[in-house]
Amino acid sequence: MIRVGLTGGIASGKSTVSRFLHERGAEIIDADLIAREVVAPGTHGLKSIVETFGEEFLAPDGTLNRAKLGELVFSDGEARQALNAVVHPLVRARSAELIDHLPADSIVVEDIPLLAVGKMADRFDLVVVIEATPENQVARMVRDRDMTEDEACARLKSQASNAERRAVADVLIVNNGSAEELAAQLDKLWLRLEQMRTEDVRVEG
Ligand code: ATP
């Protein structure tokens, strides 16, 4: 199995890259999706969050009020750490469980926005960082997500910088151009991953 960690800033193109690699045959593990799953109604995750933050973070239908919790952790570092202490181990355990059920010769791509901040690079055979200029990230958020430029800039500022992510990159994908330019970089990446898998199978065999 080849394990790839994929990360990048907000609206840098992680989902676009995941989709492309999935079309080529990669198995995708999406940390954001799993982070929602582990705090769904009826889970231990949701129970822990309510114990930590209070019932006022539940919506009337019993689901997590993500917007309200998001506002709190966006502005309060301690609350962010407390939330991460609940959610991160659950995401890690669920990801491991999903990966355990995949075929042994899979190329597994884990899309983890916080890979660099969480110092997780050591877990992977290859860390791929996708990067766009802050101007492009903001423009994409304003264009596609109904955000104002100020909101988009604030989101960007709350995240790790491109330099912090570059520091953990084995492969840097720059996504400031056309879809075709991105695809050309990803074709090269996929060839490299297939080669790694061939070598891995040979060693195992
Ligand atoms: P998030 O951090 O919010 O999960 P992301 O990193 O997964 O975002 P995407 O959703 O893949 O980013 O891309 C953000 C937006 O930019 C999407 O609407 C996508 O279609 C668009 N986009 C991605 N790459 C390009 C590109 N090269 N040119 C123009 N638009 C692009």
Image (cartoon, rainbow, N blue to C red):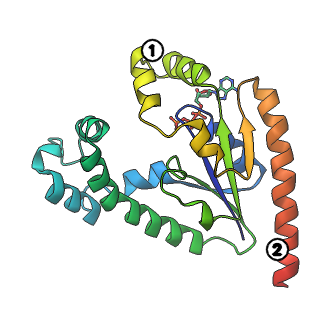
From the viewer's perspective, tell me whether residue 101 is left or right of residue 67: right
Residue projecting furthest to the bottom? 205
Depth check, mark 1 against mark 2: the one in front is 1
Q: Nearer the viewer, residue 62 or 4?
A: 4
From the viewer's perspective, tell me whether residue 18 is left or right of residue 138: right
- Amino acid at dot 1: Glu
Q: Are marks 1 and 2 in contact (CB under 8 Å)?
A: no
Percent coordinates x, y for residue 73 in the rendering: 28, 42
Q: Residues within 10 Å of mark 1 (few under 14, many from 20)?
A: few
Q: Quadrant of the N terminus?
A: bottom right
Report the residue at 53% width, 21% height from top. 138
Q: Compared with residue 132, is residue 112 higher up or lower down, i.e. above or below?
A: below
Q: Quadrant of the C terminus?
A: bottom right
Percent coordinates x, y for residue 78 in the rendering: 25, 49
From the viewer's perspective, tell me whether residue 189 is left or right of residue 49: right
Q: Compared with residue 150, is residue 7 higher up or lower down, i.e. above or below?
A: below
- Asked if residue 94 shows in the view, the reply is yes
Task: Please tell me in which quadrant of the rendered image residue 93 appears.
Answer: bottom left
N-terminal of the pair, mark 1 or mark 2, is 1
CA gap, disc 1 to disc 2? 46 Å
Q: Which residue is mark 1?
A: 149
Residue projecting furthest to the left? 55
Q: Which residue is mark 2?
A: 200
Percent coordinates x, y for residue 195 in the rendering: 88, 62
* Cβ of mark 2 under 8 A from ligand 1: no
Instruction: Name the element at disc 2.
Output: helix
Quadrant of picture, ligand 1 = top right
Q: Which mark is residue 136?
A: none
